[in-house]
Image (cartoon, helix red, strand yellow):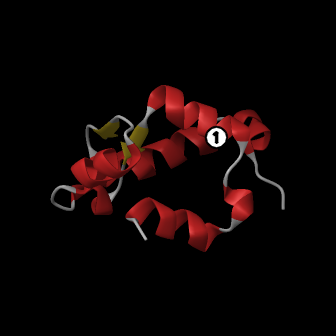
Amino acid sequence: MCLVDRASHSRGPRAHTAGLSADISDRGIALTGGGSLLKNLDKRIQTETNLPVSLAEDPLTSVVMGTAKMLEDFSLLRKLAVLN
């Protein structure tokens, strides 16, 4: 089982939505956080998915900076909230 199959299988069938699939297909995959710095991870994902993969400009702080922006705009955070 390839890397992508294992990841999607562990998340279950609800992990794939039409909107998410369209966004990923159009924009590719952006890697952030410390794990994105693993050697050749971007190349491995690109090879297995045939999608463009990019690394955040500053992957170690990008997650924190994105979270801070969301917390500054509470109305946007409410729009993006995922309800179970």
Quarter of the rendering occupied by the C terminus:
bottom right
Quarter occupied by residue 33? bottom left
Q: Position of residue 9 (x, y in %)?
A: 59, 69
Q: Position of residue 2 (x, y in %)?
A: 40, 65
Quarter of the rendering occupied by the N terminus:
bottom left
Quarter occupied by residue 78? top right
Local SS, label 1: helix
Q: How many marks?
A: 1
Towards the viewer: 55 or 3: 3
Q: Residues within 10 Å of mark 1 (few under 14, many from 20)?
A: few
- Residue at which label 1 appears: 20
Q: Position of residue 53 (x, y in %)?
A: 33, 39
Towards the viewer: 79 or 49: 49
Towards the viewer: 31 or 28: 28
- Reply above or below: 20 against 26: below
- Reply above or below: 68 against 12: above
Quarter occupied by residue 77? top right
- Reply above or below: 26 against 82: above
Amino acid residing under circle 1: Leu
Instruction: Identify the residue at the far right of this view.
Output: 84
Tell me the residue at 26%/49% (across/down): 42
